Structure formats: structure tokens, C-alpha cells
Image (tube, grey):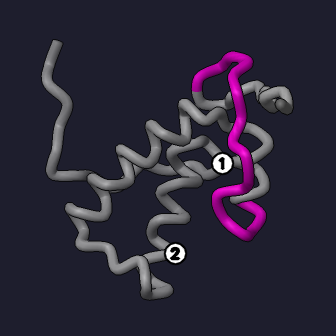
Amino acid sequence: MSEERMVQCRKLGKLLPGLTKPPYKNELGRRVYEEVSKEAWEMWIKASDLFINTYRVDLASSEGVQFMMKQTAIYFGYEEGDLAATAWTPPKT
């Protein structure tokens, strides 16, 4: 049994198990693989559903893929900017 690959997660700020492979076949995917934990990636997958549903993103189109790549880059701090607004807002605590 192989040992889990650990990464210093840029989103959560601690050493955590990393992804088993890059999520995308581009530079962003390589950076996410090297610097984002499985836990943070799972958080992104849940958040990305909100973007897909709110904006009816067609992931089969280049525009949809570009939109989601930009949101991924902003979410993990690779690009400056604000995430697109979604219909869901977190409850006030």
C-alpha cells in the first residue's frame, strides 16, 4: 500500500493529503495538484455546483469551460478577482 501524498494546502493553510492526479490537463491543473488538498478540492466541487446551476454553465462549450477555469483560479487564489455571484447565500451566523 502506497503512502498518501501530502501537500501544503494553499486554501486551508495546512499539510493535508493531496489529489491523486491533476484535475485539469493544463497549467492550472498542475498547480492545483501541487498545492491543493483533497479536502479543499471537495469544497470546490460543492461550490462549483452553485456556479453551474446559477449560470447554467455548459461544460461542453469552450465558454463554459473558460468560465469555470476562471472561477477555479479565483477560488484557490491563483487570480485576483471576485467569484461570480450565485443564487445561494450562506446563512448569517
The residue identified by callout 1 is 78
Where the C terminus falls, by quadrant? Answer: top left
**Amino acid type, label 1:** Tyr
Residue 91 placement, left or right of 80: left
Q: Which residue is mark 2?
A: 66
Residue positioned 58% across, 53% down in the render = 73
Residue 27 on the magenta segment: yes
| Secondary-structure class at tag 1 | loop
Is 58 within the magenta? no
Query: Can you name the residue that lies furthest to the top here?
Result: 93
Q: Residue at x 55, y 30 (%)?
A: 39
Question: Could you tell me how far apart the alpha carbons at marks 1 and 2 are, in whole angstroms?
Answer: 15 Å
Could you tell me the amino acid type at mark 2? Gln
How packed mark 1 is, by other alpha carbons closer than 10 Å (few <14, some 14-19, many 20 or more), is some
**Magenta stretch in the rendered image:** 12-28
Instruction: From the top left corner, tell me how far across and down residue 58 is, in percent.
Output: 34, 80
Residue in view at x 79 percent, y 42 percent: 34
Tell me the crowding category of disc 2: few under 14, some 14 to 19, or many 20 or more residues within 10 angstroms, Cα based.
Answer: few
Please provide percent x and percent y for residue 51.
31, 58
- Against 29, is 65 above or below? below
Relative to 53, 17 lies left or right: right
Element on which disc 2 rests: helix
Residue 5: image location, x then y, percent: 81, 32
